Image (tube, rainbow, N blue to C red):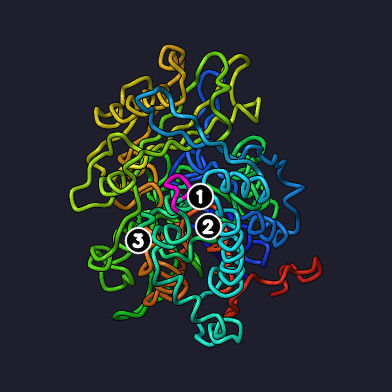
Amino acid sequence: MSRVVVIGAGVAGLATAGLLARDGHEVTVLEKNSRIGGRAGTVERDGFRFDSGPSWYLMPEVFDHFFEMMGTSTAEQLDLTLLDPGYRVFRAPTAEGTAEPITIPTGRTEVSALFESREPGAAARLADYLDSAHHARTMAERYFLYNPFTRLRTLAAREVLGALPRLATLLLTRLQSFAARRFRDPVLRQLLGYPAVFLGTDPRTAPAMYHLMSALDLDEGVSYPQGGFWRVVDRIAQTALDAGATIVTDADVTAIRTTGVGRRAAVTGVEWRDADGAAQALDADIVVSAADLHHTETAMLPPHLRTYPESWWQRRTSGPGAVLVMLGVTGSLPELPHHSLFFTDDWDANFDAIFGDRPVIPAPASTYVCRPSATDPTVAPEGHENLFVLVPIPADVEIGGGGSDGTGSPAVERAADAAIDLISTWAGIDDLRERIVVRETLGPADFSRDYNSWHGGMLGPAHILSQSAMFRAQNASRHVDGLYYAGATTAPGVGVPMCLISAEIVLKRIRGDHSSGPLPVPAPSTIGAV
């Protein structure tokens, strides 16, 4: 049994702690904040409970596999509700008035009918598109997402070699052009391109391989875990505790301790400060940092032991930042389903503003709105609605942070005001602003302060080709034995499912397992025997 310290109690840290504790290790998680969850956080005020991070439950098979690895099941841990409709798309008003929103139904048959109604012949092309998406997803899960890339022969499987021509096309073609070759309707193109934002990137630069995301929302549908994503965090944490892990909050790790000579060392533990600022130390045979990788490498390690030094980061592209707006609203909002997307007409200008050479907050900005109170009565007081608004912006700490009831930085509050007005106008909710009784905002400076996020980004490095799969920062230090990395800023990437997978990759690394796909679920009698 090894002594393991996990840095950070976000999704990746909690999942790593659970898997390693269940594998027989003595695990302690140190979390700098007073609550667990990391970016999958929660804000509670005046009877409202807001998820302040992820809100789309996608890739259910990844959750299923994780819970099975922990000796339980998704059905035992979560109460999932399939959303119908899946979401709604709003467009800017025309000269004739409010544009008719486009409601995305649940199920391939219904979605195909919608595509056909907007573009004759689109249903058949969508069938091919989704079949291709499913194939790409299957290949990704078998050979890429769970792959620690410690043995090149894992990529020499017959199925991979046979698919190389198609894989090359998907990797070298951009998602936006891939969709544009198949559909003319601009809204349909946006529907197929927007998942790139979930991956922290621009559909004009994301590899077409990521069209696999469309198999999730357009074919399988979107579910909601009752209680919100905070419930997901709680269940992951509880499985870790049940496996024997210990979680310590208000524990800010300041350094990773090592022993060795030159550019080769081994971990011996960590140094940290408690809630009173007192210096503490904890010995460890293994350290797993699920904190932001840039912060881990540049703040917790000496320069000669950094696998990813500052010079490496200067050549990388950040994903977007975000202004998050959490609103408590009196009365009902039937105009908004559980999920809504507000797409600007000038798609390119919106992404140029975020990712271009001179980044600025887009105006108008494509915006995402979640109304969980449409599905979950526990997130708002009776007679009120809960709105979570996400405005993608440049990752720039100088934009500032948020606050309560308009007390955030001027730039953040202006972006929040603009988003509220956009929702009001585009969705035809004329009195939305007057009905707001709770308002909380977060901005890039909050992400930097709370999560040590690189550039104050919302997600982590963007999923462009050079920052995906084996080209992304990997899960083990090249200079420090016993030091591993998990979370959105390392492989396989951003999003809750990817964080769960990164935890399993760390488990593989520690075991010396080089396999490319998900680990076999252990039988109860084998738990702790490896």
Is there CB contact under 8 Å for labels 1 and 2? yes
Which of label 1 and label 2 is nearer to you? 2
Q: Nearer the viewer, residue 203 or 247?
A: 203
Is there CB contact under 8 Å for labels 2 and 3? no
Q: Quadrant of residue 255?
A: bottom left
Q: Quadrant of residue 412?
A: top left
Res. 10 mark:
1
Q: Nearer the viewer, residue 334 or 256?
A: 334
Which of label 3 and label 1 is nearer to you? 3
- Residue at image point 65% right, 29% down: 376
Secondary structure of the residue carrying tag 1 is loop
Q: Position of residue 190 (x, y in %)?
A: 44, 48
For marks 3 and 1 on the same chain, the one whose residue lies earlier in the sequence: 1
Tell me the magenta residue range: 184-188
Spatial separation of the CA atoms under disc 2 and disc 3 = 23 Å
Residue 78 higher or lower than 51, as above or below: below
What amino acid type should be assigned to the residue bearing mark 3? Thr
Asked whether the viewer can see residue 59, the reply is yes
Secondary structure of the residue carrying tag 3 is loop
Q: Position of residue 459 (x, y in %)?
A: 41, 51
- Left or right: 269 with respect to 333? left
For marks 2 and 3 on the same chain, the one whose residue lies earlier in the sequence: 3
- Residue at image point 32% right, 65% down: 301
Res. 499 mark:
2
Spatial separation of the CA atoms under disc 1 and disc 2 = 9 Å
What amino acid type should be assigned to the residue bearing mark 2? Cys
What amino acid type should be assigned to the residue bearing mark 1? Gly
Q: Classify the position of the C terminus by image quarter.
A: bottom right
Residue position for label 3:
205
- Residue at image point 41% right, 30% down: 325
Q: Is residue 186 magenta?
A: yes
